[in-house]
Image (tube, rainbow, N blue to C red):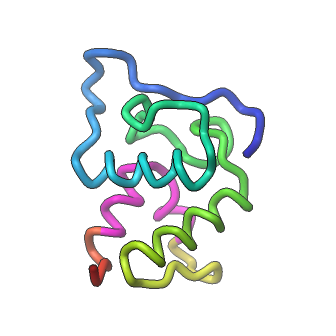
Amino acid sequence: MSSSALVITPAGDSAQQSMPEQELAELLVKALNLEVAPSAIDPTAPLYGDGLGLDSIDILEVALEVSHRYGFDLRSDDQNNVRIFSSLRSLAAHVAAHRTR
């Protein structure tokens, strides 16, 4: 994981995590050994770069974990990856629309 600062949701912020976002936040923290509580991840903050600080290798690891858990492939050549991985919220929406389990 890159050394960028993690973006967290302040208490009382309107960017509350939904249940699917909470589940994915837990997957991110576990798969990438992040040193942040899943509930502290702002669902609207960027996953890549300055937001959560993930790099391309982290995104590949997340794609593998999501594929295994939810039963569909996230392909590296998908032209929608920038949108899909733009935030926890966008990833959760994509998973909800494509999951098979």
Position of residue 48 measured from the top left corner of the image (x, y, whole percent):
62, 48
Residue 3 coordinates in the image, percent (x, y): 77, 34
Q: Is residue 30 left or right of residue 12?
A: right
Q: Which quadrant is the C terminus positioned in?
A: bottom left
Q: Nearer the viewer, residue 32 or 60?
A: 32
Q: Is residue 52 above or below residue 11?
A: below
Percent from the top left, x then y, of residue 80? 51, 73
- Estimate the x, y position of residue 64 in percent, counting from the top left: 57, 73
**Which range is magenta?**
81-95
Residue at (60% x, 32% y) in the render: 35
- Residue at horizontal 63%, vertical 65%? 61
The secondary structure that most of the magenta stretch takes on is: helix
The count of marks equals 0
**Is-magenta flag for residue 27?**
no
Q: Residue at x 42, y 29 (%)?
A: 40
Quarter in which the N terminus is drawn: top right
